[in-house]
Amino acid sequence: MNAQPVIEARSLYRSYGRWRKKVNAVRNISFEVGRGEIFGLIGPDGAGKTSVIQILAGVLRAQRGVAFVGGSDVLSHPEAVKTLIGYMPQGLGANLYESLTVEENIEFFRDLRKLPDEAFQKNRAELLKMTRLGPFLQRRAKNLSGGMRQKLALICTLIHLPNVILLDEPTTGVDPISRQDFWEIIRRIVEERQVTVLLSTSYMDEAERCHRIALIHAGEIIAQGTPESIVGQASGQYATIRADPQPAALNALRGIKEVLSTQVFGEEIHIRYEGNLEEIEKELMRQATFVRQSSPQAPTLEDVFLQLVSDTARRSPSLHFATAHRRDSDFPIECRGVVRSFGDFVAVDNIDLRVRRGEIFGLLGPNGAGKTTLIKMMCGLLEPSAGTILVAGFEVPKDKDRATAQIGYMSQHFSLYRDLTVRQNLRLYSDLYDVESAKFSHLIDPLGLREFESRLAGDLPVGVRQRLSLLCAVLHAPAVLFLDEPTSGVDPQARRTFWELIYSLSRESGITVLVSTHYMDEANHCDRLGLMDQGRLIAAASPSALKSESERRSGRLLAIYGSPLRMALDALHTGFPSATLYGDVIHLRTLDPQFDEQKVLALLNRAGIREPRVHRVPLSMDDTFIDFIQTAGASHA
Amino acid sequence: MPRRILGLIRKEFLQILRDRALIFILIWAFTVAVYTSGHGRAMEVTNVPTAVYDLSRSPASREFLSHLQLPYFKTVAYLESEREITNWLDSGKASIVVVIPPDFQRRVDGTGTAEIQVIIDGAFASSATIAVAYIAAISGSYSVSVLEHRAGAAGLSLSSVPQVDERVRVKFNPNMSSTWFSGLLELLNMLTMVSLLLTAADLVREKEHNTLEQLLVTPARPLEIFIAKIIPTIIVVLGLSTLSFFLVLKPAFHLPIRGSLFLFYSVAALHVFAMTSMGIAIAVVARNLAQAMMIMILILQPMLFLSGAWNPPEAMIPWMRALSYISPMRYFIDFGYGVILKGSNFAVVVWDIVGILLFGITLMSFSLWWFRRSLAH
């Protein structure tokens, strides 16, 4: 890092509201970002990321502390700072004008920045090329897809070639290909022009793309450094276990003292433990479960985050229902040729899908892929334009009145009455479903709702609201539970608890769960995944099957290290044009790993790269999804 | 009634009771607002600022001017020149200028017609019209007194001259008290507007907060959800009307209640049903609160004008009269005045009831149809 930081924040403090409703959004936040550095503020929604970025962009006043950007004092001269920076607010293209075309939007920002024509033309051409938006100049902003909007927003932010860029959640809800493009643009402008980038994200897996990161939780920085150094702070060991039958294995693991925490990801159970993995395995065998596989695993950033936020081992809740037996098919969710169009726009395009009883099925896709529309149709909230949907054996929406008793639905927005208390909301829903409170009152404690019973739903923390919504959705013991992006806006800890509850509903009460998400890493919780893109279901299989299918088709993923990295990449490009830079690592897909590993090492050694290393690494869900989209696109074209 | 509807109704009451500001506004609307409008929208004119330009300065002119008395006219100035007339009128310090020509005395005494000129600020047309009518009455009675005077001098009695003497008996509102009229009108208006606004705003809010969507995945059906909106509104609005009757209209304005209160409340409940149906229809069509409010402003104004409260339907131009038949207010105002002031019985107001009922059922059917349709579109 250079001696003089470009961005400097010291002891920033900001609160909202007063008295009882006071929220400390930013508490004693300090960090520095050097020239040419990509610095990521990483944390869940509501952690204070946006407030920090707004303070540095000069649009929000800090109540205490000092902030400098490019040598100017933000707090005393916010206007001076605004000319130095490019700031992109949160939301897909929030700085754009809907009714203007791509070209008019770009020109508006030129006028705003009073840019000389020559510089403007040059930047414009360059940015359009990078974002591949050139062919869409005459399209109105409102008709762009989410990813395109975000790229246009980025062009508008960068059109005056600022030296400092502040990006607030630039990739949230963006499709994986646009996300990849986005990171590539950022990487290039940083490399070519030594631009300084401060960005925020709630996707933990994006941390690796940054040079340095700060983990933010409840307005405070809980860890700061390079991604590797933070992951290195993890204490205890991690392992993945596959065992049959899984519920018994999970119970057994929870009884073992050395196991500090458990978390189910589809067929796998992730554990944090102390001592010896073999001992734990033996103990499992003794309790009559068959361990198919157990392997140590490197902790993730999210693991570290959870450790830092609460270091106490928490016992997982269990939700058990006396689910009355009902007329039920083996496939409580079935879609045949389902289409839904809004005017010319086809939101859901010919979807065939069957979900087994008790299965957790995930719909994974970017915003606008059609997930919500599909779920709404299954709940009978929208009529399909074509095709048939059967839920718990009833056709919806035709037989909706009979199906509703079997359907639980949790929408993507909090949809209970904010001006009623927890108890009053529960009372309402028990009346609506004609269920006696005795049937579900035993769930109030495991869901951690007891202490909030007399609080207004609107005043609850997000995680608690989520669990209340869940209870209202399942108190009638439905056969099928639909969850539309249930964890957006929830911190990792609450998210983990939430998934434990979902798991318990699925495994212990046999409820079939269909859940949508745009968090790629969350997809691993599901038994099976449906990848959705532009209204189509491009693949459906278990996460591991999807990954191995992608590996079979497009090859294993190699992570290549070496120094200097730039030279290493150039050297690799002579033999592997598809090698890409991913943070401080080079990624390369290969169908013949054994041969290519040798070839990579040979190329690196010949170029005189220091400490060359090649590892085979598992594919991330992101990589897998991109691969499927590209193959699906190719087969459709 | 199914448990679902009872649960929903309980929820509506809890929400209303939780909203202290709303309760305050509602009570205000049905008490203070009714009281002020009873007094504020008086149909007489009082204290009209009047300037006099008396060129005659004769006993006759003074005699005439002495009739321009309080409480109706307040003489604010005696003008000295014609230029002053415009000044007083333009500045708004005077609304009426009475000009008496120099030959007034001569004409009154002689055989010609004595003329006076009245210049009036017509900007506030309704009070101007009334003031003009008063002055016409004053000059009329003045003429009669002149006639009487001369007849007396000639030894004739005026009673020997044939004339029409109108003996007006005002039914239902013998003092023609405008507070009765305005106060009751305000109550009927409030009853209408509150039913409409309360429901529309509430349902749009449910839409915006996605609570409606959540209800729709439960066994609750659209009609049940709507009924659960209507019943609490009826109870709340009728309760508030009772406050208005017994805290304001009766004690302050001595409004008689001549007809059956039971009939009034029953039909008022039907009217609230019709208006909540309209609120539901608006909420179902509107995408957000702002849109709903704009639609309501567009609908409420003409609805009130076409109600016949301010000018009777008979006096409207034909196409507007035709339109007034689809204004539910027309029926309700007609009904309300009939039952409260005239003591009309069921037979008299039956067509009003039919009108209100048809209106409500039509809108409710429309809402249900649109609601179901929106699932498919």
Image: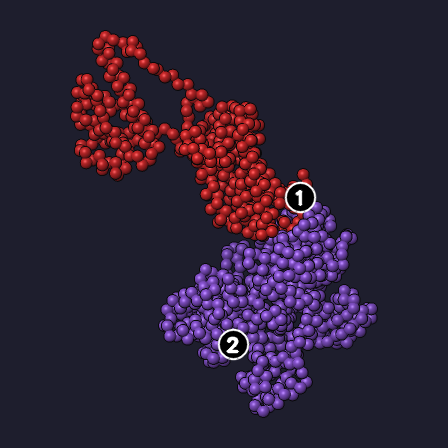
Snapshot colouring: by chain
Kind of residue sitting beneath label 2? Arg
Residue that label 2 marks: A187
- Whether discs 1 and 2 lie on one chain: the answer is no
Whether B37 is drawn above or below A577: the answer is: above
Q: Colour of chain A?
A: purple
Whether B337 is drawn above or below A141: the answer is: above
- Residue at image position (51%, 70%) is A199
**Residue A117 appears anywhere in the view:** yes
Helix, strand or loop status at disc 1: helix
Crowd class of label 1 (few under 14; some 14 to 19; many from 20; radius 10 Å): many
Counting from the top left corner in percent of width and height, residue B70 is at 30, 26
**Residue A453 appears anywhere in the view:** no
Counting from the top left corner in percent of width and height, residue B36 is at 43, 34
Counting from the top left corner in percent of width and height, residue A369 is at 59, 63
- Residue at image position (58%, 81%) is A579
Q: Are marks 1 and 2 in contact (CB under 8 Å)?
A: no
Whether B138 is drawn above or below A97: the answer is: above
Quadrant where the N terminus of chain B lies? top right
Chain to which mark 2 belongs: A
- Residue at image position (54%, 54%) is A20
Side of A310 where B179 appears, left or right: left
Helix, strand or loop status at disc 2: helix
Counting from the top left corner in percent of width and height, residue B156 is at 25, 8
Give residue B306's quadrant in the image. top left
Q: Colour of chain B?
A: red
Residue that label 1 marks: B4
Chain to which mark 1 belongs: B
In the rendered structure, find residue A426 and report the number of the disc placed on it. none
Which residue is more in the foreground, B266 or B296? Answer: B296
